[in-house]
Image (tube, grey):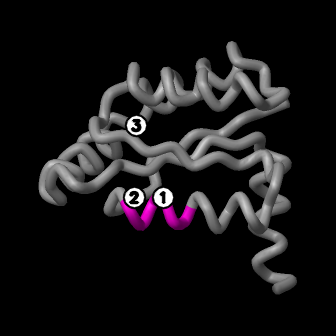
Amino acid sequence: MQYTFELVGISPVLSFFNQQQELQEKQADSGVEYLANHQCHLDTFVSSVEMVSNYRTWDLDQVVDTVIKFWVNNEDSINYWKDRLRDAGKDNLLIARVADIGSLKNTFESLFQD
C-alpha cells in the first residue's frame, strides 16, 4: 500500500475538533486521517502518525517513511506553513493529511458524486 502526507492548512483548535467529529460521523473508516499540531516539527507529526497507525491496518514503517520523505523534499512548503502557524497565534493548529492513496482517491471522487 502507498501513502501520502501533506501539510494542508491552519485551523483554530475548536474548528478542527468540530471538523473531526463531523468526519467521524460521515466516514467511519475512510483511510484518510487529519492530524493537528501546535508545532511544525517532523517529530510531532511522526508521533501523531504512530498514534493513528495503532488503530489502522497501515504499515507504520511505510507511513513514517512517507512523512520523512515529505519533510526532506519540501523545505519551502514546511517553512511556509511554519510561518503561517506562527502568524496565526497560539490558539491555532497546523493541519496535515495522511492517507493511503487509494482511499484518498476514493474520497476525492466521492466529492464529484455528491
CA gap between label 1 and label 2 equals 14 Å
- Could you tell me if residue 10 is visible in this image? no
Residue highlighted by disc 1: 17
Indicate the secondary structure of the residue bearing disc 2: strand
How crowded pointer 1 is (Cα within 10 Å; few <14, some 14-19, many 20+) is rated as few
Residue highlighted by disc 3: 74
Give the amino acid at mark 3.
Asn
Question: Which stretch did the figure color magenta?
Answer: 14-19
Residue at 42% over, 24% down: 72
Q: 8 or 30: nearer the eye?
A: 30
- Could you tell me if residue 63 is visible in this image? yes
Q: Mark number for residue 9? A: 2
Q: Which callout, 1 or 3, points to the residue nearer the camera?
A: 1
Q: Which quadrant would the C terminus be assigned to in this image? A: bottom right
Q: Residue furthest bottom?
A: 114
CA gap between label 2 and label 3 equals 15 Å
Give the amino acid at mark 2.
Gly
